[in-house]
Image (tube, rainbow, N blue to C red):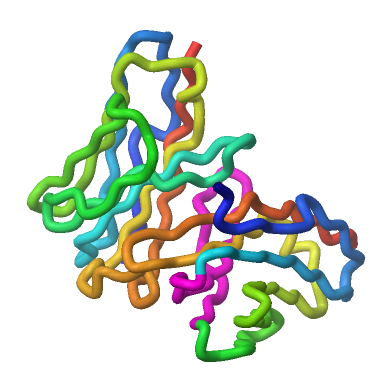
Amino acid sequence: QQQVKQSPQSLIVQKGGISIINCAYENTAFDYFPWYQQFPGKGPALLIAIRPDVSEKKEGRFTISFNKSAKQFSLHIMDSQPGDSATYFCAVGSARQLTFGSGTQLTVLP
Amino acid sequence: KAGVTQTPRYLIKTRGQQVTLSCSPISGHRSVSWYQQTPGQGLQFLFEYFSETQRNKGNFPGRFSGRQFSNSRSEMNVSTLELGDSALYLCASSLGTSGKPSTDTQYFGPGTRLTVL
């Protein structure tokens, strides 16, 4: 059973554009929704995270939008830069573990 | 502060062999989690250790085991390797004191790339 579905699988954006990645989950028991960024040859790194009592969280060019009733959350990258080219993973957290989405490979064209 | 370190970075084994991977967490972190990353299955949780005790376990066969030492360093062992075990094995450390990932940010190491021939 796939607990978190992430889309799109890949995304190509022009420099300066907005990148949007979506995730949907099923279990309402999840209480932590992080996004991780992974560059080739590196482990994932926490980018930004949100809890379900907040609908939006912004850190610099990165924003998480959270819709509790729809059980969906998304990552928005404003003013996308070539250096943002990486694989992005959403995750859902419960008391004991993180469950990751399948990942989105983002390419930002110069 | 030094990050999470994993050794070795690359490993080639043949089917039927066993392998041991090592993870040194960030200083002061007591929780270590292990993940398997493959192109087909993505990032999958293997298990988590805290204070030398396995606190949580994912859905992997018993061939996958781990342990944690008193200095919080952790090892993961895979016995009777199969071709499908080829993957990037990641470990992540966190403070672990809250027992919940919502307050325990996980910091990942660079991983060990295991190839099974």
Residue A11 x/y as whole percent: 83, 57
- The answer to whether residue A66 is seen in the rendering is no
The answer to which quarter of the image holds residue A89 is bottom right
The one nearer the camera, A42 or A53, is: A53
Residue B29 x/y as whole percent: 23, 64
- Name the residue located 56 percent from the left edge and 71 percent from the top edge: A47
The one nearer the camera, B73 or A49, is: A49
Residue farthest to the left, as pictured: B70
Residue B24 x/y as whole percent: 26, 49
The answer to which quarter of the image holds residue B1 is bottom left
From this view, report whether residue B29 is shown above or below residue A18: above
- Name the residue located 38 percent from the left edge and 16 percent from the top edge: B81
- Name the residue located 91 percent from the left edge and 66 percent from the top edge: A14
The answer to which quarter of the image holds residue A78 is bottom right
Query: Is A49 contained in the magenta span?
Result: yes
Q: State the extent of the magenta-drawn residues as a range.
A: A28-51
Image position of A26 (left or right of B72): right
The one nearer the camera, A54 or B90, is: A54
The one nearer the camera, A44 or A55, is: A55
